[in-house]
Amino acid sequence: MNQDPPITPQAALLRVLITGESDGAEIMRRIRDWTDGQMQLDEIGLADTIASLERSGLVERRSGAPDKRTGQARPTFALTAAGHASAVEILAASLTRKG
């Protein structure tokens, strides 16, 4: 029986950021939706995954819009050029698996 390799949190995060920068809550929701609920990152798992991808130069942290309650800028995350290239490979592989 041929099974697809599991999607890693890093691959899922790169895949969802290909459409543009997002904040943490949006990233978690989009990963859950893209994996049909198979992967659900909590805040700690997301923070660890983002930190790993930042160290690898694939994702960068940006200052987002101010939080309505606190007025502090909420960080958003976006792909770097290298991250975009990796995300394109992941997207192509996911389309091949589904098709």
Image (tube, rainbow, N blue to C red):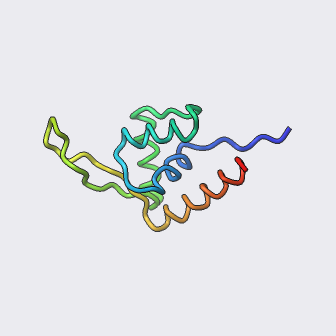
Q: Single out the residue that lies furthest toward the right.
A: 1
Horizontal side, residue 94 vs residue 75: left or right:
right
Horizontal side, residue 2 vs residue 86: left or right:
right
Residue displayed at 73% across by 50% down:
99
The answer to whether 72 is drawn above or below residue 85 in the figure is above
In this view of the protein, which residue sits in the foreground, 20 or 82? 20
Position of the N terminus, as image quadrant, is top right
In this view of the protein, which residue sits in the foreground, 90 or 59? 90
Q: Could you say where residue 47 lies in the image, as x and y percent from the top left? A: 40, 41
Count of labels in the image: 0
Residue displayed at 34% across by 46% down:
23
The answer to whether 75 is drawn above or below residue 81 in the figure is above
Residue displayed at 54% across by 43% down:
9
Q: Could you say where residue 28 lies in the image, as x and y percent from the top left? A: 44, 38
Residue displayed at 17% across by 39% down:
68
Q: Could you say where residue 60 lies in the image, as x and y percent from the top left? A: 37, 58
Image quarter for residue 91? bottom right
Q: Single out the residue that lies furthest toward the front.
A: 99
In this view of the protein, which residue sits in the foreground, 92 or 78? 92
Q: Could you say where residue 93 lies in the image, as x and y percent from the top left? A: 67, 55
